[in-house]
Image: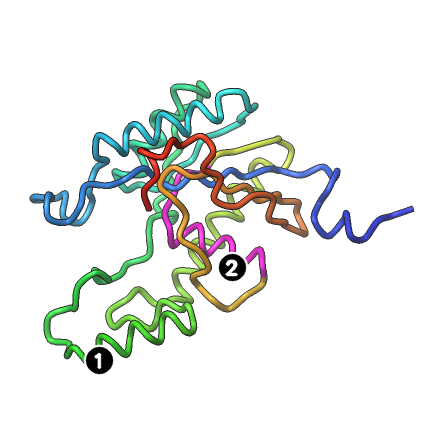
């Protein structure tokens, strides 16, 4: 007999597993110069994190490796590609949401207005709380379309890896969990999150796997 509880989570069903890998630690804002200000590379620690993620996936059968076009994701994906033997396929639509630096108040915005924006984000988990952010619906749409393209291309495969960003991973989670919130969790750098896909359904399998990261490699 069919088991609807098992079916709801794709337990035992034929599916495509997408392993979302958050990029390694990027160069902090105070150490960036020139083009690095908008597209920072990995730190030395970030490269070690990427190597740890690659080692964690070394025993898995991987059919393809994808990455956003930003340096921190591409560099992380390069280590994964070395282990899996696949070239990295770049998908610009998987780049991070366009945001002001949320760690400091934008010029021209009062302290009070910035604090209100922060409170709105904490309460509702939606990117439009921040003035100047990329429109949240447009962001969610581009991520959704990019993932639909990748999963359709690999519907007969077993597993693909996507190296991406905090916001992109949260967009995938939000669609999987059918929530209007844009932000649900802050995954560690080089953590693994697995979502199972079929043409008509998706199910969260694991979230923020960090067992491959020693304590000195845990950053977020």
Q: What stretch is highlighted in magenta?
A: 162-177
User: How many numbered markers are drawn?
Assistant: 2
Q: Where is residue 169 in the image (x, y as percent from the top left)?
A: 44, 50
Task: Give the residue at the far front of this rendering.
Answer: 215
> Is residue 62 found left or right of 78 in the rendered image?
right
For the point 15% across and 76% down, the residue is: 109
Q: Nearer the viewer, residue 24 or 91?
A: 24
Give the CA separation, mark 1 to mark 2.
27 Å
Q: Main secondary structure of the magenta part?
A: helix
Residue beneath disc 1: 113
- Pointer 1 or 2: first along the chain: 1
Label 1: how many residues lie within 10 Å, few (<14), some (14-19) or many (20+)?
Answer: few
Q: Residue 53 carries which label?
A: none
Q: Which of 35 and 181 is in front in this view?
A: 181
> Is residue 35 found left or right of 22 in the rendered image?
left
Q: Position of residue 164 (x, y in %)?
A: 38, 43
Q: Does the magenta stretch include residue 54?
A: no
Q: Is 210 situated above or below 121?
A: above
- Residue 183 image-quadrant placement: bottom left
For the point 42% across and 56% down, the residue is: 142
For the point 51% across and 38% down, the residue is: 19
User: Judging from the image, what secondary structure is the residue with disc 1 in?
Assistant: helix
- Residue 80 image-quadrant placement: top left
- Residue 205 image-quadrant placement: top right
Front disc: 1 or 2: 1
User: Judging from the image, what secondary structure is the residue with disc 2 in?
Assistant: helix
Q: Position of residue 20 (x, y in %)?
A: 47, 41
Task: Give the residue at the far left of this rendering.
Answer: 34
Residue beneath disc 2: 174
Q: Is 97 situated above or below 23?
A: below
For the point 35% across and 25% down, the residue is: 51
């Amino acid at each position: 007999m069919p088991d609807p509880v098992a079916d709801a989570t794709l337990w035992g069903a034929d599916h495509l597993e997408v392993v979302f890998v958050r990029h390694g630690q990027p160069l902090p804002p105070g150490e960036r110069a020139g083009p690095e200000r908008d597209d920072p590379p990995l730190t030395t620690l970030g490269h070690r994190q990427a190597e740890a993620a690659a080692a964690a996936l070394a025993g898995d059968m991987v059919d393809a490796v994808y990455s956003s076009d930003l340096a921190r994701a591409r560099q992380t994906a390069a280590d994964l590609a070395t282990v899996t033997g696949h070239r990295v396929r770049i998908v610009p639509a998987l780049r991070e949401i366009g945001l002001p630096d949320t760690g400091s108040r934008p010029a021209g915005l009062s302290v009070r207005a910035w604090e209100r924006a922060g409170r709105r984000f904490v309460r509702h988990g939606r990117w439009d709380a921040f003035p100047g952010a990329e429109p949240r619906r447009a962001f969610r749409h581009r991520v959704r379309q990019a993932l639909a393209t990748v999963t359709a291309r690999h519907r007969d495969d077993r597993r693909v890896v996507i190296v991406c960003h905090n916001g992109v991973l949260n967009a995938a989670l939000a669609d999987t969990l059918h929530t209007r919130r844009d932000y649900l969790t802050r995954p560690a750098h080089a953590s693994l999150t697995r979502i199972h896909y079929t043409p008509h359904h998706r199910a969260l399998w694991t979230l923020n796997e960090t067992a491959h990261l020693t304590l000195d490699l845990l950053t977020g």
